[in-house]
Image (spheres, rainbow, N blue to C red):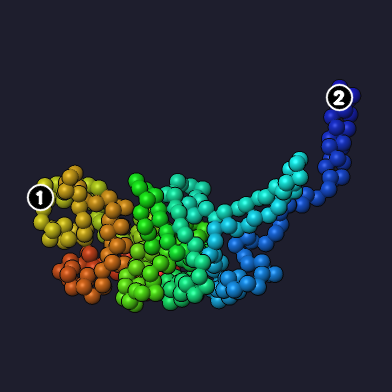
Amino acid sequence: MKKIYYIILLSLLTVTFSCSKEDDLEPTDMRYDYFTVSPDANDEESILRRKFYEDHNIHLLFNDTLRHEQRGTYADGTPHWFTELLDLSYDITTTKNETRFTYIRDHQKQEEGIRYAETYILPHLGEGLRPYSIFLVETLEEYGWRWKTVAYYNGKRCLALATQGIAEMEEEELKERCIDIFYNIVDSKTNYYDEELNDFMALGNNLHGETLESAGLSDDPTNEEIYALGFLTWSTWYREFPSRSSDFTSFLKAVFYQKEEDFKARYASYPLILQKYDIMKEVVKQKGYIF
């Protein structure tokens, strides 16, 4: 029996000694962030990108190629290249739509794109909402059931902005164009079950997803009856109050797409709606949106 113990002890000592002799592991590919402009680059585009990062702490891109490096050679002597692309639709939790775009080739148009981002978008995005990078492109398309032209694409590590025609747009038109961007960014950072929305949901009085009958309403209620209970929408098909998710969405859209004075004038007789609107607007501010 002692012999067995000695063998086990010797084995453990051998393993311990072997582990202590191993060299420290060092990670490979320790180069800086590939969104960053190379410190040696001094062309016009690189200067624009570097200054933008210094001013806003956001990487600026005009090209979706993050790196293109030689990684040795093949047997026949030809170089082996490694290319990393931006991949706008990258997401580890879900599948997003494909995109396609055209580059901005003209330096003046690149500067116009920067002014667009700096003047109309970044002033409204606090730290919690700012993208890791902004990709300025000439045209941008997204594929759903078909390809369609879009003004932006909000990805996990990049906000892509189409700039074609912005130089000819009036200020109000540009502001209107940005509302969709702001709504999408805030919506992507907010969930109806967030703790900040507990008070909002409580005003639904446990009616979310319940039948109209449960609140003593008919199958064909008036809008006023729905509004009095604090809801902006209801399901005409299922004769139900909105789900928590739908209720959240309807008020978030109201905050972004309706002027506050107009909204409050329209629903002045419905205190629950006004309370929910104020809570939603405060949550949007807490998320980092600057009105």
Q: Nearer the viewer, residue 183 or 115?
A: 115
In this view, the residue farthest toward the top is 1
Circle 2 residues within 10 Å: few <14, some 14–19, many ≥20: few
Q: Are circles 2 and 1 on residues that touch, CB within 8 Å?
A: no
Nearer to us in this view, 115 or 284: 115
- How many angstroms separate mark 2 from mark 1 (CA)? 84 Å
- Residue drawn 10% across the image and 56% down it: 222
Q: Is residue 217 left or right of residue 149?
A: left
Circle 1 Cα neighbour tier, 10 Å, few/some/many (<14 / 14–19 / ≥20): few
Residue receiving disc 1: 220
Can residue 53 be seen in the rendering of this structure? no
Q: Position of residue 176 (x, y in %)?
A: 32, 70
Q: Is residue 16 visible?
A: yes
User: Along the horizontal axis of the image, is 271 left or right of 37?
Assistant: left
- Which residue, given by chain and number where applicable, does mark 2 sit on? 4
Camera-nearest residue between 103 and 83: 103
Q: How many marks?
A: 2
* Residue sitting at x 22%, y 47%: 210
Disc 2 residue type (three-letter) = Ile
Of marks 2 and 1, the one in the foreground: 1
The reply, left or right, for residue 213 in relation to residue 207 is left
Q: Which type of secondary structure does the marked residue at label 1 adopt?
A: loop
Badge 1 amino acid: Asp
SS assignment at label 2: helix
